[in-house]
Amino acid sequence: MLGWAILLLASLIWPAATSAQTASPPLILEAKILLGEVSGRIDHLGIDVKRQRLLVAELGNNSLGVVDLAAGKVLRRIPDFSEPQGVAYAPSSDSVFVANAGDGSVHVLRGEDLAPIGRIELGDDADNVRVDTAPNRVLVGYGKGALAVIDPVSLSKIADIRLKAHPEGFQIDETGTQVFVNVPDAREISVVDLAGGSTQSLPTQGAGANFPMAIDGEAHRILVVFRSPPTLMALSSQDGYVAAKIETCGDADDVFVDRKRGRVYVSCGEGVVDVLGPDEAGYRRLARVPTVAGARTSLFVPELDRLFVAVRAGSNEPASIWVFRPAS
């Protein structure tokens, strides 16, 4: 059992929701973990499952927050980053990679004590980070159009994958042979063959601002969420065929697949999490779960069976991590 220690809320009555929500909500707000004096925007989240540490890229605060999930509190805050955007833990090397938008650097920390052990200079706008476990490599989106391939052992960039514009959300398929990349400024979804380096494009059907992405391996689908208009589009990972579309909440920044329950979670700056489920037409909205305006970044961790939503400090809420427990 996770030892959530702060503001346990499971026993509270859930607020009234939209007409799409049933009497038994699919997400229960279980806890709020206060982050302390953190100002400005919070960007992406990472997880060290073994140590039950949530890693918080505190972009506006130029810091990395480290949350002890078992204790339900901030373990420490590491300062002196430069607009950290992406963060990921690499189990094979027991290290943490933090990508910085401000100076284009990637800082590497030792997993055990979070001491700095390396720094890789990418030059400009280092953003999302993904760990490709089988071949043991780390991919970082950066600059005006590239994915850097980093060796987590030598802590060096070993290759670049060129793209038409700056990459936003991207995912590596389960075979480790392809990477799917949202390139919103080029109005495309790029598919890169990691072995041969060839690139092709998937259709966006006129939709724009495609930022978050997830892969549903069981359904062989790529889930892409657009902000203009707010839409989730499910494409076949094999041929790019558009299998389903559904309207979503506005200003989406993360999307995740809950395989255990067959659900999809979309977190939006509109101040909600859309919970989607399958139906004959593709997907239907099961619930629109309220959060806080601007809280668009999240992380679903299947190993812990929790959805974490980052809430920036505002007039009514302190900076915090909201912990949602999926209802069976």
Image (tube, rainbow, N blue to C red):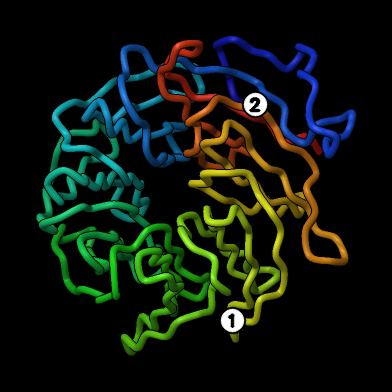
Q: Determine whether, in the image, residue 161 is placed left or right of residue 231.
A: left
Q: How many marks?
A: 2
Element assignment for label 1: loop
Where's the N terminus, which quadrant? top right
Residue visible at 16% across and 37% down? 82
Q: Is residue 168 above or below residue 36?
A: below
Element assignment for label 2: loop
Q: State the residue position of label 2.
A: 1
Q: Amino acid at mark 1?
A: Gly
Q: Position of residue 227 (x, y in %)?
A: 52, 53
Q: Amino acid at mark 2?
A: Met
Q: Is residue 138 above or below residue 250?
A: below
Q: Nearer the viewer, residue 326 or 114?
A: 326
Nearer to us of marks 1 and 2 is: 1
Where's the C terminus, which quadrant? top right
Q: Determine whether, in the image, residue 255 is placed left or right of residue 279.
A: left
Q: Position of residue 259 (x, y in %)?
A: 70, 55
Residue visible at 60% across and 84% down? 238
- Label ID, residue 328: none
**Residue 42, image quadrant:** top left
